[in-house]
Image (cartoon, rainbow, N blue to C red):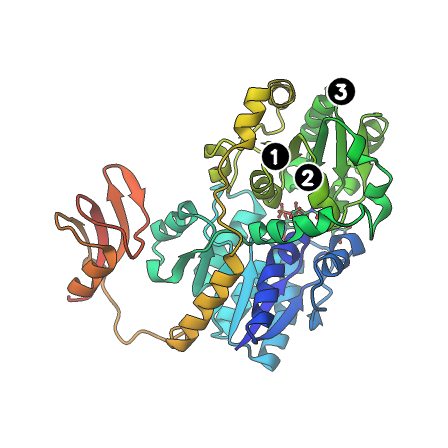
Amino acid sequence: MKIAIVLGTRPEIIKMASVMDEIQNKGHELLLIHTGQHYDKEMSENFFLDLKLPKPNYNIHVGSGSHGKQTGKMMEGIEEVLLDEKPDIVLVQGDTNAVLAGALVAVKLHIPVGHVEAGLRSFDETMPEEINRLAADVSSKLYFVPTEESAINLAMEGISRKRIFVTGNTVVDACFRNLKISEERDVGEYEKSLADLDIDNMENIVTLTMHRAENVDFKDRLLNIIEALEELDDTNIIFPMHPRTKKTMENFGLFDRLNDLSHVHIIKPVGYLDFLLLTSKSTLILTDSGGLQEEAITLDVPALTLRYNTERPETVTAGGNILVGSDKEAILKYARKILDDEEFRNSMKNAKNPYGMGNAAELMIKIIEDADAADSLKLVAPDEVMASFTRKMKVIDEDISVKEYEDKNNALIKIAFEGEDVKFPFDDLNLKGKTIILEDYNN
Ligand code: UD1
Ligand code: UDP
């Protein structure tokens, strides 16, 4: 098969690395399209070096700009490539503008889209990423979701369970594959920024990252966070600063205030191997990053998330992550608890990772191969349109699994409830005592 990947930013490169490996290991042709949304060496090229990834076949060089302009340019460039190259499927990952552009362009050319890390919802419609996630998820054919919670989000939006696959998150693939490599090499092999700090002999390392528009574009929120950081003066705060954050902090006149603190070390963004080493040696991660919330729980490091909502609620319910927003008191309260209270710290460290076993890419490529073999990747117009009255609700008394029920009744189960709890209708879920919503194909 010819499998295209559209990506454009740091986290997409990291989270698609194992998928690229798997595509090539299984003998498929990889068509890699970089939108050029991230273009600094330390936001893009270094990750290709660190993770030993193939050079993109195309770079659209969109650069920075407003959402409309950036996405529009991406769409134009991606369309040209897809028309020329005609891949069998296009994969996008996550929730950036590359995902929106890649998914929309592909589906309109009737090329099936596989959305990696589909189904996440923050339910915050002011977040650009939430809009991207929603738009990508109406354009996709296959949904690779990290957890049952994300699967339920999609099922509740009406998407057929047969297109939703719980694979875990490729971030676990990335962590597991690279942590050992990173431990066996010298810090800062590619970039000096971290090498100058002696992290092996530092105590109380706090890794800080921040780049979300809703934090770094607002002076009052930045100020609250900085005031909390000022008080954590018995820690070593290492802050690889995202270029967006550097720009806005300088514009607000806040950069020097933070940089002048002796316990705060602002450095350039570091490569993935260095960063893994840093996070794994940290006592605490303070972040508004999506990927880092996942990596924290994968690496058993307590996380405080500088947001008021998260599309990764599993990390919070598992006990590894606490939402502190930009609230100075909440940041300080929980940071102190993690630093000073060993029992509390250990309970956070021991939170169970909800994101799978690190074989997400392997599962995805197998699912794509199977769908292709079954000829179910094609986008086709339906012969007949089912009216809404074919949707029904039923209480099941029988000892029967989802798959058995569907085969016997010529139906598709959309979602199941056990009492008030929502259950994703996996093939082997036993339906006895459950209420189901289904599409009945007999009418
Ligand atoms: C983007 C994604 C965000 C993701 C993040 C990962 C969207 C809407 N946002 O946010 O979901 O979490 O990437 O890091 O897609 N800049 C540089 N050099 C670069 C890239 C950016 O200096 O290589 C600066 C520019 O001033 C630019 C600003 O950072 O205007 C923001 O970049 P942009 O790509 O628009 O969004 P991110 O904040 O990086
Ligand atoms: N990361 C990195 N170097 C850094 C900061 C982050 O390699 O200096 C990695 C981090 O391990 C994670 C990813 O970048 O895998 C997260 O990217 P980011 O926070 O930019 O985006 P988000 O996940 O919020 O979309």
The amino acid pointed to by label 3 is Asp
Q: Above or below — where is 305 with respect to 91?
A: above
Would you say the residues marked 1 and 2 are in contact, meaning their CB atoms lie under 8 Å apart? yes
Q: Is mark 2 within 8 Å of ligand 2?
A: yes
Circle 2 residue: 279
Against 318, residue 182 (above or below) is below
Which SS class for mark 2? helix
Graded by Cα atoms within 10 Å as few (under 14), some (14 to 19) or many (20 or more), the crowding at tag 3 reads few
Q: Earlier in the sequence, mark 2 or mark 3?
A: 3
Quick one: which residue is furthest to the left in this view? 397
Mark 2 to mark 3: distance in Å?
18 Å
Residue at 71% from the left image edge and 43% from the top image edge: 277
Quarter occupied by residue 338:
top right
Give the SS element for disc 1. loop
**In terms of depth relative to the viewer, which is nearer, 438 or 170?**
170
Q: CA distance from mark 1 to mark 2?
A: 8 Å
Q: How many marks?
A: 3
Estimate the x, y position of residue 9 in percent, counting from the top left. 67, 55
Mark-to-mark CA distance, 1 and 3: 18 Å
Instruction: Give residue 65's quadrant in the image.
Output: bottom right
Q: If you read the primary sequence from the N terminus, does the residue marked by circle 1 or circle 2 appear first?
A: 2
Give the numbered dot on residue 234.
3
Q: Which residue is mark 1?
A: 301
Q: Mark 3 or mark 1, which is nearer the start of the sequence?
A: 3
Residue 370 vs 100, above or below: the answer is below
